[in-house]
């Protein structure tokens, strides 16, 4: 985040979550400053308890990043288990911003894409 200050304070609380959803678009492959491959993608998960719509979850994969990048495509269903990472920072306008990511420990490839399109992101959704 160019020009942003990152809050480096962390708590000792660890959150583990499992999410099943479909990729909203094809994953990206980046490399850390040390050259480690990092695969990133967003999944859409149906809301529960009879509520309409979807929750959108950003997923980050370190081990296995290259395999996931090669084999996952928009619409593919996955089951992801990992830790929730919370990041908070102040932008250039002194407004606080925050983001949650699911840092994957495991990614299971499930159903291939349907013939219908994968769930579209709502307008203005940030990755």
Image: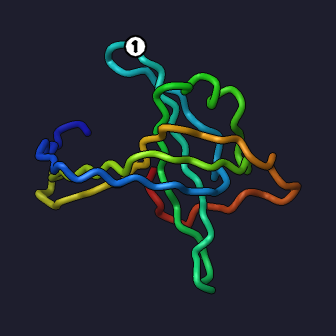
- The outermost residue toward the bottom is 50
Q: Tell me, what colour scheme is on the image?
A: rainbow
State the image coordinates of residue 111 (x, y, percent, origin top left).
79, 49
Give the total number of marks visible in the rendering.
1
Residue at the spot x=43%, y=48% of the render? Answer: 102
Residue at the spot x=26%, y=39% of the render? Answer: 1
State the image coordinates of residue 40 (x, y, percent, origin top left).
51, 38
Q: Residues within 10 Å of mark 1 (few under 14, many from 20)?
A: few
Q: Is residue 114 left or right of residue 125?
A: right
- The outermost residue toward the top is 35
Q: Is residue 110 left or right of residue 69?
A: right
- The outermost residue toward the right is 115
Q: Which residue bears the numbered disc 1?
A: 35
* Element type at mark 1: loop
Closest to the observer: 11 or 118? 11
Residue at the spot x=88%, y=55% of the render? Answer: 115
State the image coordinates of residue 29 (x, y, percent, origin top left).
53, 27
Q: Quadrant of residue 17?
A: bottom left
**In this orientation, does residue 5 appear?**
no
120 is higher (above) or lower (below) than 110: below
Closest to the observer: 19 or 23? 19
Closest to the observer: 28 or 91? 28
**In this orientation, does residue 8 appear?**
yes
Q: Quadrant of residue 27?
A: top right
Closest to the observer: 86 or 121? 86
State the image coordinates of residue 9 (x, y, percent, origin top left).
11, 46
Residue at the spot x=16%, y=50% of the render? Answer: 11
């Amino acid at each position: 985040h160019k020009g942003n200050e990152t809050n480096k304070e962390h708590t000792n609380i660890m959150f583990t979550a499992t999410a099943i959803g479909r990729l909203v678009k094809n994953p990206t492959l980046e490399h850390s400053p040390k050259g480690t491959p990092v695969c990133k993608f967003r999944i859409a998960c149906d809301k529960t308890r009879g509520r309409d719509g979807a929750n959108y979850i950003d997923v980050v994969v370190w081990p296995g990043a290259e395999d996931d990048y090669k084999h996952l495509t928009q619409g593919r269903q996955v089951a992801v288990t990992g830790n929730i990472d919370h990041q908070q920072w102040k932008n250039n306008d002194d407004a606080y911003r925050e983001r949650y990511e699911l840092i994957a420990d495991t990614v299971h490839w499930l159903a291939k894409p349907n013939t219908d399109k994968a769930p579209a992101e709502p307008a203005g959704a940030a990755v």
